[in-house]
Amino acid sequence: MLIIPVLDIKDGLVVRARKGQRDSYRPIETPLSPSAEIGDVAAGLREIFPFPAYYVADLDGIEGWTTGAGVFDNLAPLRTHASVWLDAGFCEAGDLQAALALNGVVPVLGSESQSDMSLLQTFHGHPQLALSLDFRGDDFLGAPVILDEEALWPSRVIVMTLARIGAGDGPDFRRLEAVKKRAGDRVVIAAGGIRNARDLERLEEMGVAGALVATALHDGALTPETVAGFMARADISVV
């Protein structure tokens, strides 16, 4: 089971995400780091495990306050240690192409940022691209055709359940199972609600390849020993 730590970035700082309510996000306070600076938080996470990848949500880009390219310079310290899966609200071909050209970056095409299928149709075959199927409650966010046309899903698919982020409610196993059945041989990554090792074990049993995790790492629910055990069984080629 691949564990990918999440860094939610707002105004240049790592914030504590909860239930997808972005207006209420505040700079993170965590025993892993003396500050909410990206480099400090990432260094604290590396004390748990030398993770081969981080997931970065550029919330300013996702909300449309900045362009997708605006966060690239901030990622340089991360990319010296690991690859970066980046959702920056990509909705323009130029920004997505720029991200695809960066070594060590996996651009994540978030469905909530897509008004139609055009970017997915153009880039779905690119080996670096990942797709995030974004949900809030039972509602799919983005152009419905993205959810319907699994033939155009790229090789890596994230199932993002925003309302479960940081809420302690557990992953949306039913939705993950439904997407996994449709995904064929694609890699499926769970996002939202991971509480503990038991959740990861259940996802592993379902054939889910990995999980995006934040709260359980910062709060100590996943210890270094537990993380190492899961990562020993992970398919690192996914990153």
Image (tube, rainbow, N blue to C red):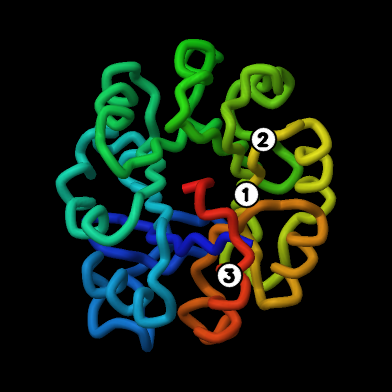
Residue for badge 1: 189
Q: Position of residue 230 (x, y in %)?
A: 62, 71
On screen, residue 182 above or below 136: above
Q: Earlier in the sequence, mark 1 or mark 3?
A: 1
Q: Do the residues bearing badges 3 and 2 touch, measured as CB atoms within 8 Å?
A: no
Q: Is residue 59 above or below residue 179?
A: below
Which label's residue is closer to the chain start, 3 or 2?
2
Which disc number belongs to residue 186? 2
Nearer to us: label 2 or label 1: 2
Q: Residue at x 57, y 60 (%)?
A: 2
| Image-based side of 239 in relation to 172, left or right | left
Viewer-nearest residue: 142 or 78: 78
Q: Answer left or right for 166 relative to 41.
A: right
Q: Residue at (60%, 43%) from the top-left corner?
A: 158
Mark 1, other Cα within 10 Å: few <14 / some 14–19 / many ≥20: many
x and y percentages locating residue 234 in the rendered image: 60, 60
Residue closer to the observer: 233 or 174: 233
Label total for image: 3
- Res. 104 image quadrant: top left
Element at label 2? loop
Q: Secondary structure at mark 1?
A: strand
Give the residue type at disc 3.
Ala
Q: Residue at the spot x=34%, y=25% of the render?
A: 96
Q: Which residue is mark 3?
A: 232
Q: Amino acid at mark 1?
A: Ile
